Image (cartoon, rainbow, N blue to C red):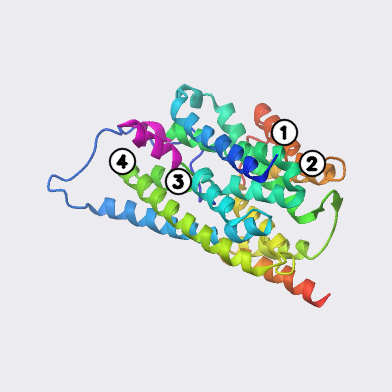
Amino acid sequence: MTDEGIPAAGDQPGGDDPLSDTWEGDGRRTPAEGIAIRSGFFVGIATAAYGISFGALSVAAGLDIWQTCFLSLVMFTGGSQYALIGIIASGGVAAGPSAIATAGLLGSRNAIYGMRMAPIVGIGPWWHRLAAAWGTIDESTAVSLAQPTGHLRRVGFWVTALVVFVGWNLTTLAGALIGDALGDPRAWGLDAAAAAAFLGLLWPRLKRVQAAAVAVGAAVVATVLTPVLMPGLPVLVAASVAVVVGAFNWFGRETRS
Amino acid sequence: MTLWQVVILASIATLAFKFAGYLIPQRLLEAPTPSRIADLLTVALLAALIAVQTFADGREIVIDARVPAVIVAAALYALRVPFIIVVIAAALVAAGIRAVT
């Protein structure tokens, strides 16, 4: 799942009180609500379409249809799902620990999204907050934070999360069934499709020089370590590039025009 | 370790991060370093996965049909072609090259 420009932490447009709801007295839908609902719906449909590629690639990687659907239902965060099946495809079950660690680390950004969404949607009974946390992904966060008021942000979040969740799970099943019927994944170019899918997730994140530098560094580290370490580990070690660059804020000043 | 255990443990790990976001006090966000590292972690992991998915065959580095496919994909993303079409195009390029070589 890609994000189309989630505002970086700290530049959240400011300070509106999430509790100051703007329902019109007669309960009719305002034009601003229409915009929030429509953008959530379209982002949700577009995202759900990738579920086909995830389902097919997952079966090609050696997971069965149940395992594939379990990931989309429970893990429900595209980047981590692709990472898990990518590492299993290259290293098999022996690479399991690396696959778990990579999927987990890639999902760590959802904790940051959660911290920003908690005051907006993390209210009400416990099952409400549980559903909010479950539905906190790139797309629901991005659509929500793009709305101007607390109420519209809630509408944007829930519409997007719901449409992506239903669509993503249905298309995952369809993709898994298609992938099951395809046979040899290499003959169909599915290994290249997986690389292209990762590239699609990365592309919108490369706007800043710092991110581009980290991407190049991590790619070089992973490639150089591939002959040395067992499959899965080069990706994990490459993650340290982000920790080092992020901790010292190298390349952090300039922005690419 | 079975494949099911990998699938379940990894799902627990990612869900734990989602829940943590709603439980951790928001003060952590005021420190820019943790959120910057989390952002860059995503970039580094995706870039590393692209590199491995493009060049690795087990523990060997191999230049094959995947490389032109990924170059085509990059060009299409630069032209703002939608994700699903790019992924299919990359598969077609690799499958086409393999069919004729």
Q: Give above or below for B99 relative to A153.
A: below
Number of the label disc, if any, that sits on residue A240 = 1
Is residue A126 covered in magenta? yes
Mark 1 near mark 3, Cβ–Cβ under 8 Å?
no
Q: Say which amino acid is labelled 2.
A: Val
The x and y percentages for residue B25 are: 45, 22
Helix, strand or loop under label 1: helix
**Distance CA(mark 1)–CA(mark 3):** 26 Å
Same chain for mark 1 and mark 2? The answer is yes
Amino acid type at mark 1: Ser
Q: Which label sits on residue A142? A: 3
Q: CA distance from mark 3 to mark 2?
A: 31 Å
Name the residue rendered at 40%, 35% in the picture: A130
Have a look at marks 4 and 1 and say if they share a chain: yes
Tell which subunit mark 1 falls on. Answer: A
Q: Are marks 3 and 2 in contact (CB under 8 Å)?
A: no
Range of residues picked out in magenta: A117-135
Mark 4 and mark 3 in contact? Answer it, CB < 8 Å: no
Reading the image, the residue beneath label 4 is A149
Label 4 residue SS: loop
Q: Is residue B98 left or right of residue A195?
A: right
Percent across and percent down for residue B100 are 80, 77
